[in-house]
Amino acid sequence: MQSKTILAALVVLSVFSVLIAGCLSSEKMQEKAGTDTIESGEIGTNIETPDIVTPDINESEGDFPLPF
Amino acid sequence: MFGDIMKMNVLFSLFVCFLLAGFVVAQGANETLNVSENGNGDANNSKALNSAVIEARYENVEYGYEKTLTAMDAVINYFSNSNKTNISTSLLVELRETFSSLFVGLQQYVNASDPSGFGKQVAEMHKTAAQFKSESAKIAAPGEMGDLRKLIQNRTDEKENETEMQEIKERIKEFKAKTYKIACELNLARIKKFNEKIEAQNISSEELKNVSARIQEKCANITQIKNESQLNMKIQSIKELFTMGKLKVIAHAKIANEKAMEKANDIVNALENKGYNVSAVRESLDEMQTIRNEVGQACINATNEECVSKINELRNRTNDLSSDIKVIVRENIKNIKGNVSGR
């Protein structure tokens, strides 16, 4: 009786996990499909131009005028 | 039987709890990673870069300050010890004190990482040193000029050989290397993030990856270089790579944004073919075409900054258009539903 119960529990758990996984993946698929459709209006433009910086160390800043 | 059902319930509840906990932990970890990699990482590196630049500038100024102060002291001593009674060195002493206190005040701008305040204070120091130079020239007799020049040369040469000055020189090297190391990390991270975005739009990032690899190679072990001329050569080549990276980033951003605009055009056409009313966005598309032409012109004839500013303008307009398209789609769907239910 005990082993049958555990077996039944495992079967139920498996079914639930498959259902949950299915729900999650179908939601993601729908989301993906949605973004691919023209109706989503997604153009994918959010590309900012990064600022490539060059440090500005002016080495002559410390060259003070000496007397004479 | 009731006990078995209870056991099953407990097992199921545990399973759901684990599933939820796993989901929450995974989401949390993902967010933390994104923030540290993209947002905070960049902000922290930018902050560290600003502070390293100002520290390097401070050491440069300190070196020049010590040398100039030595020259000022030599001049004041020369006139004070001269036998001429008609000479007053009080103005020179006052200018020396002003120069000295301006240098002391410089530290507050280092602590606050304020490059603008720092620059203004150094400009004041330059003004004061120039005034000292002109005032001391007024006092000196024409025949004394040569002796004074020689005296200053000897004193400043002696000063430069002092351990204190050698230590400042070491610190200048250290801060310069540190500054470029941080700049390398910052730029590499920015290029990497940018590459990921353009790759998602099927734009090749190979050229940028090559520049990144070269930056990475040049920047490796930069803080371990002891020889000053070697360090300067390395810095020069890194600077050239940064410029190359900047130009390539701009060129790729231009392509990505133009491609997005073309996509916007295709979407609007497709919606129109499906019977949607797109008149509201047609005008925007025409205006964007004008901006696109301006981007082309600015990136050929104007500065990099103006080119980037035009690219960003196009990007913002495309983003606005994307929102407008969503509104059009929503409105049209509503109308279609209304028509269907009204039948």
Image (cartoon, coloured by chain):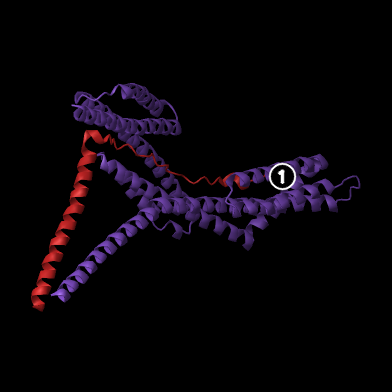
Chain colours: A red, B purple
Q: Is residue A65 visible?
A: no
As rendered, which of B12 and B342 lies closer to the eye? B342
Name above or below for residue B6 compared with residue A54: below
Q: Residue at x 31, y 57 (%)?
A: B27
Front-most of B62 and B316? B316
Q: Is residue B31 left or right of residue A30?
A: right
State the residue at coordinates (76%, 47%): B148
Quadrant including the C terminus of chain B: top left
Q: Residue at x 26, y 36 (%)?
A: A40
Determine whether, in the image, residue A57 is placed left or right of residue B142: left
Position in image of residue B8 (x %, y %): 17, 71
**Residue placed under numbered mark 1 in the picture:** B129
Mark 1 residue type: Ala
Between B202 and A35, the one nearer to me in the picture: A35
Q: Horizontal placement of B185 versus B269: left or right?
A: right
Q: Could one spot residue B50 in this view of the protein?
A: yes
Horizontal and vertical percent for residue B250? Answer: 37, 36
Q: Quadrant of the N terminus of chain B?
A: bottom left
Residue B257 drawn above or below residue A63:
above
- Relative horizontal placement of residue A24, taking residue B292 as reference (left or right): left
Above or below — where is B323 with respect to B154? above
Q: Secondary structure at mark 1?
A: helix
* Count of numbered marks: 1
Residue B209 location (% of width, % of height): 30, 46
Chain of residue at mark 1: B
Q: Position of residue B142 (x, y in %)?
A: 80, 39
Residue at the (74%, 42%) spot, across then down: B133
Q: Residues within 10 Å of mark 1 (few under 14, many from 20)?
A: many
